Image: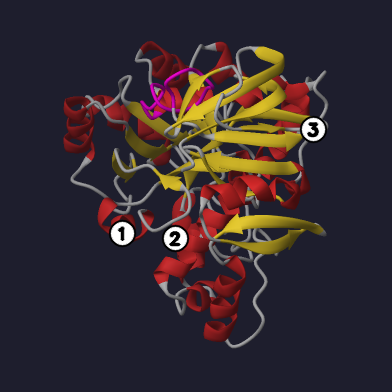
């Protein structure tokens, strides 16, 4: 039985503390402590660093296709959505089985070190698929598409959805001020009118936020998700993230979909660092970036008792990367796909380098062999079969650059 084991001896980033030459023990899918197991230990030799597995705070898994769509800049999301739904790429995507599109999105996240994703879409759309995916897609949330009069009418309305979140102690998630027209810029005002701005509220995009909007978000302890790649592609600008952070707002990073955003979360954090430097002529702190893909989204989505950090009793979601133990945060921020060495969810390996094959074999799970950037990897399931099905459906060999197998 694969019920207890340890990994050691490692540099472990919790991420609030860096522990050198330390082991971590997993028992029944949860972290049991920082010591070697008496039952089974896997010594990790080489330049590796262990982090909590990553959390993608905003994705649209049903939008997992490529190439990007649209010509920017747009005044708001609505004309981009029109271009999306009238594009031949959208028509091509929709030839595929919806589950295969979700599966492509799941693998996109997995190979970049992500085990947990918030998929922003109504429950009746993603519920049939998410339990069948190799990663965790959050189930407990209420939502609106956007806080505007011309949103896509997801959910039962802003006020009702927010009340549902408060009652059930789950997040209420909405796009906000994704544009610069008069209606978009009323986003925070729309939430206030329906008493829907609170510690349960998770706000995505906010590119139109004024100083007053930022202060209101901070005063109500609401949370913010930054998607810089998608913002810049669609609008040639992004949110006032320095001011948002300075106001004390809990801030996370998400990818949006590959139709507008970066290819994966590790590309997204590199773009975040780049655009921040261009906006403010200073560096975005690497430790803060790591927080924005671990502890911060766990807090925003009210799952901090289970995920986001490496602590006794939390779920055994682990990310092992190749890197410099003397500069661990920078190592993660600058990592490429080839540096994602091992991804574990609730104690079970899902993806990793072939030199960890003994962990995969001992887990008892089925896995296949793929190559990423010329490096042999083991992965749960059959992504090559997935890409074969996609190509057969569209009638040519389809390449998805976010899944470069």
Looking at the picture, tell me which residue is in the foreground, 71 or 101. Answer: 101
- Verify CB contact (< 8 Å) between mark 1 and mark 3: no
Whichever of labels 2 and 3 marks the residue nearer the N terminus, that label is 3
Residue numbers of the magenta segment = 301-314
In the picture, measured across the screen, residue 402 lies left or right of residue 250, that is: right
> Of helix, strand and loop, which one carries label 1?
helix
Question: Badge 1, how many Cα within 10 Å: few under 14, some, many 20+?
Answer: few
Whichever of labels 1 and 2 marks the residue nearer the N terminus, that label is 2
Question: Badge 2, how many Cα within 10 Å: few under 14, some, many 20+?
Answer: many
- Verify CB contact (< 8 Å) between mark 2 and mark 3: no
Q: Could you tell me how far apart the alpha carbons at marks 2 and 3 are, in whole angstroms?
A: 39 Å
* Label of residue 125 in the image: 1
Report the residue marked by disc 2: 62
- Verify CB contact (< 8 Å) between mark 1 and mark 2: yes
Report the residue marked by disc 3: 45
Name the residue rendered at 48%, 54% in the picture: 134
């Amino acid at each position: 039985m694969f019920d207890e084991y340890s990994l050691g001896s490692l540099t472990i980033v919790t991420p609030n503390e860096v522990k050198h030459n330390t082991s971590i023990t997993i028992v029944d899918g949860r972290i049991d402590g920082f010591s070697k197991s008496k039952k089974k230990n896997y010594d990790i030799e080489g330049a590796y660093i262990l982090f909590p597995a990553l959390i993608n705070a905003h994705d649209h898994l049903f939008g997992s296709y490529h190439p990007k769509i649209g010509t920017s800049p747009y005044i708001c999301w609505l004309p981009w959505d029109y271009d999306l739904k009238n594009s031949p790429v959208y028509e091509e995507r929709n030839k595929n089985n919806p589950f295969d599109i979700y599966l492509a999105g799941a693998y996109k996240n997995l190979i970049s070190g992500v085990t947990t994703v918030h998929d922003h879409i109504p429950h009746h759309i993603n519920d049939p698929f998410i339990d069948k995916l190799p990663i965790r897609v959050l189930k407990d949330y209420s939502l609106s598409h956007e806080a505007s009069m011309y949103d896509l009418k997801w959910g039962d309305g802003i006020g009702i959805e927010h009340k549902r979140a408060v009652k059930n102690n789950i997040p209420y998630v909405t796009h906000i001020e994704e544009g610069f027209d008069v209606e978009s810029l009323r986003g925070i005002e729309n939430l206030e009118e329906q008493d829907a701005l609170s510690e349960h509220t998770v706000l995505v995009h906010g590119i139109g936020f004024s100083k007053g909007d930022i202060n209101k978000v901070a005063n109500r302890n609401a949370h913010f998700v930054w998607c810089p790649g998608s913002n810049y592609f669609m609008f040639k600008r992004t949110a006032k993230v320095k001011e948002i952070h300075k106001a004390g707002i809990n801030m996370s990073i998400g990818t949006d979909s590959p139709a507008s955003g970066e290819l994966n979360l590790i590309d997204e954090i590199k773009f975040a660092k780049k655009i921040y430097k261009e906006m403010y002529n200073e560096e975005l702190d690497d430790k803060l970036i790591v927080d924005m893909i671990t502890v911060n989204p766990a807090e925003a989505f009210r799952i901090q008792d289970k995920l986001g950090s490496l602590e006794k009793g939390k779920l055994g979601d682990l990310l092992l990367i190749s890197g410099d133990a003397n500069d661990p945060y920078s190592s993660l921020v600058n990592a490429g796909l080839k540096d994602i060495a091992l991804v574990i969810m609730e104690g079970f390996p899902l993806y990793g380098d072939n030199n960890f094959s003994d962990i995969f074999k001992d887990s008892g799970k089925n896995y296949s062999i793929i190559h990423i950037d010329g490096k042999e990897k083991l992965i749960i399931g059959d992504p090559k079969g997935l890409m074969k099905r996609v190509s057969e459906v569209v009638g040519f060999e389809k390449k998805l650059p976010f899944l470069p197998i």
